[in-house]
Amino acid sequence: AETGQKAGWNPQLASKNNLSVQGTTPTATETSVLVQGGSLRTWSYRSPLVEQVQVVLSTEGRPLDADIELWHGPDNTPCKMRVYVENGQLRPFSAVIDTPRGPNTVAIRNIGQIEFPFAADVYANDVEDPSEECIASSATIQGGALRTYPFDTMVDSVEVLLKTDGRPLNARIELLQGPNNNKQVIELYTEDGFDRPFFCILETPGSGNVVRIVNTAPVEFPMTAAVVPHSVNEEMAAGHHGDVVLGGDLAW
């Protein structure tokens, strides 16, 4: 059911995007749609020329809990993911979904409570691509194994690229800051990790950030993963340190 119609609703824009509600939050762009808790929004692309779309989810600072699915034909879901973010303003979710051989529909469901809406934006223009460093640094993660990637304080965001040789891809991506303190979690399934690789950008503000990649598939389904810095804080890189940690005993 479509609920929560906004006063600034634009019928022409809604018709263009196959949507019935147009809303924004302070952290959203002009094309974002406000997705209330428990509701579903879809973006349909009929043209086969649309081979990739970027999905961006954000909040006003509240937690974000969403299900994202790619529908390709009746009862066919070649890609789906469950996304949790502790603070959708500090760490907005941004991922690229491959949509070969249209038509395709991206479905986003807010599985949080009614008190936790989020802004969703899906677009096919100016989609971000993995860097050459990211593509070149891929390493194999066997089924059931995990790998961790710690990052320095000066790294503001990181790129994550997961793919396979054509087998299904099942993975869990976690952004931790401190022991067992999950700031962002992505549970991913892709029908074909070669035809539909997964690429996302994780915001890593503060210190002590670690990205953990878990291959949740059996041992017969290895995958390749690459996690590299995307943006670096130039002030900290030049020697201006942010967080200061003091230790030791004080002499009395």
Image: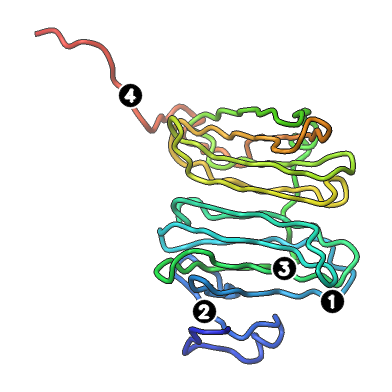
- Residue at 61% in and 28% down: 148
Label whose residue precedes the other's in the sequence (2 or 3)? 2
Label whose residue precedes the other's in the sequence (2 or 1)? 2
Label 3–label 4 contact, CB within 8 A: no
Label whose residue precedes the other's in the sequence (4 or 2)? 2
Residue 78: where, in percent of width, then height?
Answer: 80, 58
Label 2–label 3 contact, CB within 8 A: no
Q: In this view, does 88 lie above or below 138?
A: below
Residue 229 falls left or right of residue 8: right
Residue 202 falls left or right of residue 160: left
Numbered disc total: 4
Q: Which amino acid does label 1 sit on?
A: Arg
- Which mark is nearer the camera, 4 or 2? 2
- Which mark is nearer the camera, 3 or 4? 3
C-alpha separation, residue under disc 2 versus residue under disc 1: 24 Å
**SS state under label 2:** loop
Q: Quadrant of the C terminus?
A: top left
Task: Read off the residue under disc 3.
Answer: 106
**SS state under label 3:** strand
Task: Read off the residue under disc 1.
Answer: 46
C-alpha separation, residue under disc 2 versus residue under disc 3: 18 Å
Q: What residue type is labelled 4?
A: Val
Task: Read off the residue under disc 2.
Answer: 23
In front here: 200 or 182? 182
Residue 114: where, in percent of width, then height?
Answer: 43, 71
Label whose residue precedes the other's in the sequence (3 or 4)? 3
- Residue at 71% in and 84% down: 16
Q: Is residue 103 above or below residue 137?
A: below
Label whose residue precedes the other's in the sequence (4 or 1)? 1
Q: Residues within 10 Å of mark 2 (few under 14, many from 20)?
A: many
Q: In which quarter of the image is the N terminus?
A: bottom right
